[in-house]
Amino acid sequence: MRTRSGLDAVVVGAGVLGASVAYHLARRGASVVVLDRGLGGFNATAGNHGLVWAQDKAPAPYLGFTLRSIALYPDFARELRDLTAVEIEYERPGGLYHSLDDGDVVARAAFIARQSLTPGFAAEMLDARALHTLEPLAGPAVVGGSYCALDGHTNPLSLARALHAGIARLGGVVHRGWEVSAIDAPAGGGWVVKGGAGILEAPALVLAAGVGTERLARLVGLEVPVRPQRGQILVSEPLPPLLRHPSVPARQTRSGTLLLGATHEEVGFDASSTEAGIRQVARSAARCFPFLADVALVRGWGALRPLSPDGLPILEQPAGWPGLFVVTSHSGITLCPAIGQAMAEWVGAGRRPPWLPAFDRSRFRSATPGPMAPAPAGLSVE
Amino acid sequence: MTHPDLRMSPPAERGQPLTIQLDGQPLRCHEGESLAAALLASGRLAMRYTARAGEPRGYFCGMGVCHDCLVTVDGLPNVRACMTPVREGLRVETQRGLGNWGGAA
């Protein structure tokens, strides 16, 4: 039996959330191993278009936590660049929301007004002229919208790569192709993880496997209600700088390609790309940006994002499972630094940091909607 | 400016002669030819210059996959010369970088 001892924590899931928790643990001096059954980050991490976004988030406490994460981003990007030489391409040019009819403008204004009750949040409504001044290539179908200066974007694949490299630089290990088959809780405490490549033991175990978290949690008799939601996105040929501000239908990457998003499909664990999905994404982006009709698409793909019943994160140290932590969230790109920092603090200090709002599963037991109501349907993005 | 004609001599059968505009100059070619074939037959190897290094690129795979023979056709950038049949009056420009999308605005 191969046992690696002396570990402080095992993290299951090498997507951006698991990797961020492991990275922040390693920064605190912990000895960590990250396991991923695939290559690390090929579900939600690869299947989103990299928005770091506040203006569509449900109000406080979720929005407040989001703002904290956004505030961490510039230093986070710099620190990863200094440590690993990987550039995550974080930029904060301000994000746009495009409204295609007057009714939507009214609904949007009400939503933004509600958002603005959260300290630190600011966004403004734009009429058609103001919006076209900010984004000259928006088409005539865009009748208005909103602008939030806090919004930006990053390269999710570079982010994952930077975190993996950072973990290694800080003495941690990322194992790919390592599928967990069993998890035991020995009498003396701690957790034993068994799988394809051996056995690992550590006092702390972090389950951060996105859509795979439910299966892993069941191995220790824990119910974590997370379901997969498929998002299909498209990427275009590289273009000269055309779009000034990222938005849900389209953002322009540093290399010049446009990333177009995204479907929200309830199709179980089927991550495939479909013609209908490609058409839907392309059509809604081209309604906002008519010049896209002449732009060639290079590739489209689908990926599964983890969604809890109310769309908000589950960040918990369940009572009765000492040393076990559950970390799963939609919007993992936006929340990457804050969740990593908060959970590393929690694992290290044994207590939920006071600045981390409660995101535990007890909220699902109450049938009445609480203050953490989800964002309006179709608005929740990464 | 006159171009060489690198086409095989008869008895190869060709379509009707026609004229396209290459960087503002007339270029004689034949119906049924691809733009890439017509440019090659005129001795032209470079169809575009890359965005970062400004290096010449041309006909590579010849079947629409490699996206190396991109030219600007009738004002639209990133058109694959190998997949575009010639027709009378077509305006072709050597593309520099990612192309001029200003007309899209």
Image: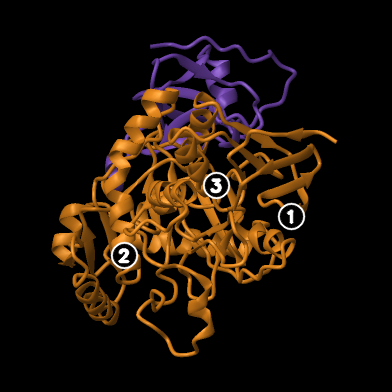
Q: Is residue B66 above or below residue A24?
A: above
Residue B27's spot in the image, x, y percent?
Answer: 46, 22
- State the residue in front, A130 or A221: A221
* Chain of the residue that carries numbered disc 2 in the rendered image: A
Residue picked out by circle 2: A63
Q: Amino acid at mark 2?
A: Leu
Residue picked out by circle 3: A18
Q: Residue B65: tell me if it is visible.
A: yes
Q: Residues within 10 Å of mark 2 (few under 14, many from 20)?
A: many
Q: B96 left or right of A360?
A: left
Q: Which chain is orange?
A: A
Q: In which quadrant will I find the C terminus of chain A?
A: bottom left
Observer-side mark, 3 or 1, equals 1
Earlier along the polypeptide chain: callout 3 or callout 1? Answer: 3
Earlier along the polypeptide chain: callout 2 or callout 1? Answer: 2
Q: Residue B22: tell me if it is visible.
A: no
Q: Amino acid at mark 3?
A: Gly
Q: Amino acid at mark 1?
A: Ala
Residue B81's spot in the image, x, y percent?
Answer: 54, 30
Observer-side mark, 2 or 3, equals 3
Q: Residue at x 71, y 45 (%)?
A: A37
- State the residue in front, A48 or A186: A186
